Image (spheres, rainbow, N blue to C red):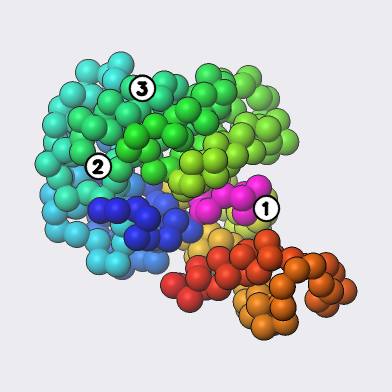
Amino acid sequence: MNPSDFLPPRSALYLPASNARAIEKARGLAEDLVILDLEDAVKPEDKDAARKAAFEAVSAGFPGKLTAIRINGSEMPWHDEDVAAISSSASDLFVVPKVEDANAAAAIAARVGKPLLAMIETPLGVLRAPEIGAANGVVGLIAGTNDLANTLHLPDAGNRDGMSLSLQLIVLAARASAIWALDGVFNDLADPDALAAHCAHGRSLGFDGKTLIHPNQIDIANRSFSPSASEIEDARALIAAASGGAERFRDRMIETMHVEMAERLLVRAGAL
């Protein structure tokens, strides 16, 4: 799989690899990326069975979707077996939690032989995000907002203000290396309006999409990270009106940069 052949996912749904019912249901849902989790979502006694289930699930396929497997970190006893299993699996990508070292990221990407989505979940990870994003084999950064809130000692994990700088640094690092940037999860499953606000905030920071923990969150994320009808109309009109150099368009000044932004928006809209 070459990630450059794909648009960044708007919605990336975490699923416990031990939950066969959820995995089967996800095949008929609208998420762009399925992340089968072997880490936090799986009890220690279920790790081996989850690894086998993840291998079988990606072998069976998820039509029209990208697939990834999140492995246990290098400090965990299941790590080596996870790496061996996913190296020979049919997953498109793999996810590593709590990445803090660019050399280690490059090494495990080479060892697995698949594109790596690196989770940035600690202050050290944030500070080293530019190097991690530039490491060989890394194709995207994921903001691990729950762990980040914990390691930053934020009193409210849902308060984006306290981690705004960290989120912006993650996006900046991703853009510097022309890789994907995915926003962290939203925990409140009963507040779709707040989820939409989080998605809008993430998009305003430059994130490509959002990681999710429940199927009910997919449609909101997809809408939030897709160009709206008004954005598409404006982009088409801007491109048609542009004649080169700085000029006035709909009471704002535009130049070549704005044409490039409009073209990028239309590429994403056309693919969707």
Is residue 66 at least partly visible in the picture? yes
Image position, residue 65 (x, y; %): 31, 62
Camera-near label (3 vs 2) is 3
What residue is disc 2 on? Answer: 114
Give the residues in magenta: 202-210
Amino acid type shown at disc 3:
Asn
Q: In the displayed structure, would residue 73 be above or below residue 193?
A: above
Camera-near label (3 vs 1) is 3
Q: Nearer the viewer, residue 246 or 253?
A: 246
Disc on the earlier residue, 3 or 1? 3
Residue at 55% in and 44% down = 175
Residue at 22% in and 49% down = 91
Q: Nearer the viewer, residue 11 or 180?
A: 180
Q: Nearer the viewer, residue 13 or 10?
A: 10
What residue is disc 3 on? Answer: 103
State the CA–CA distance, disc 1 to disc 2: 30 Å
State the CA–CA distance, disc 3 to disc 2: 16 Å
Q: Does 206 lie within the magenta span?
A: yes
Q: Does 9 lie within the magenta span?
A: no
Amino acid type shown at disc 1:
Ser
Q: In the displayed structure, would residue 11 be above or below residue 86?
A: below
Q: Quadrant of the C terminus?
A: bottom left
Q: Is residue 103 left or right of residue 238?
A: left
Q: Residue furthest right?
A: 251
State the CA–CA distance, disc 3 to disc 1: 31 Å
What residue is disc 1 on? Answer: 204
Could you tell me if the residues under marks 3 and 1 are in contact, i.e. CB atoms within 8 Å? no
Q: Quadrant of residue 116?
A: top left
Q: In the displayed structure, would residue 209 be above or below residue 243?
A: above
Could you tell me if the residues under marks 3 and 2 are in contact, i.e. CB atoms within 8 Å? no
Q: Is residue 196 left or right of residue 140?
A: right
